[in-house]
Image (cartoon, rainbow, N blue to C red):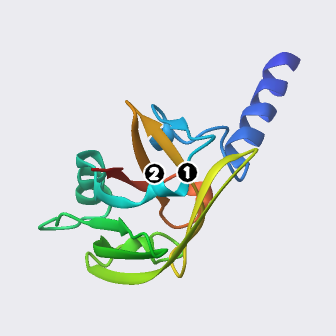
Amino acid sequence: MKRNIYLLILLALFLASCHPLFCVWEMGYNKVEKLNSADVIGKYVLTPHSKKMMQYEGKYQNITNSILELKGDKTYRLIDAPDWLLNDLGNSNMAYFDKTGRWSFDCNKQGCILELEGLQTGELLFKKNAKIFILLGIGDPDSCQGMVYEKK
C-alpha cells in the first residue's frame, strides 16, 4: 500500500514536470557534434512526416513545399513556412509566411547550434543517414513539438 502511494507520487511529479526526458519527435536523429559552417549552407525542405503533422495537429489545408535556404553570406530565406512556428503557444491559423534574416552557427559541448534571426534561437543540428536536419520547435519547448527540414 505504501509502495503504491510512492509510485503515484513519482508518477504525478513526472507528469507535472516542465520538460520530459526526451521528445519523441527528435527520436531517430543523431546530434551533430562537429561540422563546418560551409556544410550547413544549402537548401532544406520540410519532411513528409512534418507535413502529416501539420495536417493532423495544425489542421493545415493544401500543404505547401516549405523551403529553408541558408546562404553563404549568412542570410536565410524561409518560404511557405507554417505560421505556428511564429506563435509562442504553437497555435495554428492554418496560414503560411515567408521570412528572411541572418543565421549563425556554432559547435560546442552540447552540439552544433543554428540560430535563425527573428525565428528560432539555439536549434541543434541533427544527422540521419549522413544527411543534415534542422529541427525547428513549435511553441513552448516543453510541448515537444516541431518541424523537421532536411538538407537536399
Amino acid type at image mark 2 = Asp
The 10 Å Cα crowd at callout 2, few under 14, some 14 to 19, many 20 or more, is: few
Amino acid type at image mark 1 = Asn
Answer yes or no: is residue 1 visible.
no
Q: Please give left or right for residue 78 compared with residue 63 in the image.
A: right
Disc number placed over residue 126 in the picture, else none = none
Q: Residue under label 2, please give it.
A: 39
Q: Secondary structure at mark 1?
A: loop
Question: Residue drawn 24% across and 55% down?
Answer: 51
Q: Secondary structure at mark 2?
A: helix
Q: Please give left or right for residue 118 compared with residue 152 in the image.
A: right
Picture coordinates of residue 140, whole percent (x, y): 58, 65
Q: Residue under label 1, please give it.
A: 36
Residue that extends furthest to the right in the rendered view of this protein: 2
Question: Residue drawn 54% across and 75% down?
Answer: 88
Answer yes or no: is residue 30 visible.
yes
